[in-house]
Amino acid sequence: MLNKSIAAVSLLAIALVLQTTLGNIFDIKIDISLAALVAASFFLGFLELLFLVAAAVFFLNWQPVLSLDIAIFALIPVAAYFVRNTFPWQPWVSNLILIITGTILSYIIFGTSVFAVKPEIFVWDILGSIIFGLFAFRLLNFVQSHDI
């Protein structure tokens, strides 16, 4: 159990560093930390997930007051935790659907102009999130199944 937590924290740290690095250096916005949190919601307990979400929120927005977009960002993995077992598919498919849904939801709420002005940003965000989300899910699944 501790190993899953360590793997999830490591994945989130990698995602946050990649997300900020890609955003700062290459001006690419890929929300891979959301993908890492959604993948972690399939393997962690509720309190462990809340800790990871709080850590991501603190890292991404260190301001004393939460903005609406950060609050929505925090709610998506928590919602994924509660609906993760309601889908009839394999968990990795449910993970992908929840990542795609969360990314689309955040664009609908906050970035509808991106669809018209630069749709490639949205496509890169979806593709990057899917790739990292699959990687995170497979790694956490491996750690859980092999009890490493």
Image (cartoon, rainbow, N blue to C red):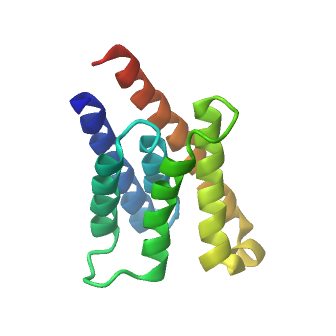
Residue under the image location 27 percent in, 38 percent down:
5
x, y percentage for residue 72? 50, 71
- Quarter of the image with the N terminus is top left
Question: In this orientation, which residue lies closer to the viewer: 86 or 78?
Answer: 86
x, y percentage for residue 137? 48, 34
Q: Is residue 111 left or right of residue 40?
A: right
**Which residue sits furthest top?**
146
85 in relation to 120, above or below? above
Residue under the image location 47 percent in, 81 percent down:
68
Residue under the image location 34 percent in, 66 percent down:
57
Q: Say whether residue 141 is visible.
A: yes
Question: In this orientation, which residue lies closer to the viewer: 92 or 87?
Answer: 87
To which quarter of the image does residue 64 belong? bottom left
Q: Is residue 101 left or right of residue 76?
A: right
x, y percentage for residue 79? 52, 57
Tag count: 0
x, y percentage for residue 46? 36, 48
Residue under the image location 29 percent in, 47 percent down:
48
- Quarter of the image with the C terminus is top left
